[in-house]
Image (tube, rainbow, N blue to C red):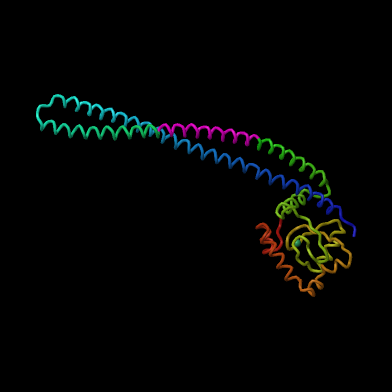
Amino acid sequence: MADNEKLECLRRLQEVLQEKFALEQQVESLPADLRKEEAALKATEREYEDLRTLSEDTVSEAKSLSIRYEDAFQLRTGYEKQMEFLSTQREYEALSKQLEDAKVQEQTLLKQRNSKNKEAERLKAELAAKEGEVEAQKTKVEEERSKVDTELSGIQEKIAELDARCLEIKGSTVSDELYSKFCNIVRKKSGVGIVPVHGQVCMGCDRVLPVQFVIDLRLTQEKNEIDYCPYCSRIIWYEPLDPETEKNYIFEQLESKGTGSESKAAAAEDKSVQDSDSYDESMDTGFEDF
Ligand SMILES: [Zn+2]
């Protein structure tokens, strides 16, 4: 059977469209790493802010402990001076007790102040390290961003070239309407929008077409027109096979082998589960209008 020009043109278009859609997917997935790095930077910036607040609080706590320690120091030395001027045993005992308490308080505050100062120093070092981390991540994000921008513009350029090539191939052989419909089919059917029919079987969805439908399809094809699979909505064309091979795709043969229309349909449904939602829909509701 003589092949028709429109079908030939669509097959060539499909090759270019597959390439174009693959590039479009790259455009969508390319910035994923960048988004990840931007999120990591935000998280580190938040950690830095929390650390800064903690560090400032610790410094002011250390200052306050320092002042309280100074007061305790003054109190203790004051009591010690007073000890020199005591006259009675009773006064001595009372002041001794106060002096002991003041010494304990002074030592406690000294320990607390020292440990708070150490903590403040540690936080200061941690904060400086975190600041370095933020800066390094910022640089990384910037580099990734400019890399992505460069790659994206390269891909966009290629996509524009492929669009131009499609229009060139399409010429006046395929109408604008058919072209846009075909683009949608190829996109929705994972890059395969035009498939051959072997015997009675659509090679896109594996379903068995009615005999009369295939006869009509061959006539349509001869008139340089096209038709669609009533099950998966792809553009179909009858591809002659050698008679021995073709027998495997004839309804009666499929029936007798126990791989008739029902099991074929079941196989097609299995396939539809793995496919996109639209594919599923097309199986449930029949023909999908693109
Ligand atoms: Zn089909």
For residue 75, side relative to residue 201 (left or right)? left
Where is residue 147 shown, x and y percent of the image?
A: 66, 36
Residue at the spot x=44%, y=31% of the render? 124
Residue 145 within the segment the image draws in magenta: yes
For residue 12, side relative to residue 62 (left or right)? right
The image shows residue 244, relative to residue 14, as above or below, that is: below
Where is residue 139 shown, x and y percent of the image?
A: 59, 33
Q: Quadrant of the rendered structure where residue 40 is? A: top right
Residue at the spot x=86%, y=66% of the render? 245
The image shows residue 232, relative to residue 27, as above or below, that is: below
- In the displayed image of the protein, which residue is found farthest to the left? 88
Which quarter shows the C terminus? bottom right
- View quadrant of ligand 1: bottom right
Would you say the magenta stretch is mainly helix, strand or loop? helix
Residue at the spot x=13%, y=31% of the render? 92
Q: Quadrant of the rendered structure where residue 223 is? A: bottom right
Name the residue nearer the viewer: 145 or 205.
145
Name the residue nearer the viewer: 123 or 248.
123
Name the residue nearer the viewer: 32 or 94.
94
Residue at the spot x=62%, y=42% of the render? 33
Where is residue 76 shown, x and y percent of the image?
A: 22, 29
Question: What's the magenta region?
Answer: 120-146
For residue 36, side relative to residue 62 (left or right)? right
Residue 174 within the segment the image draws in magenta: no
Where is residue 135 shown, x and y percent of the image?
A: 54, 32
Q: How many marks?
A: 0
Name the residue nearer the viewer: 48 or 91.
91
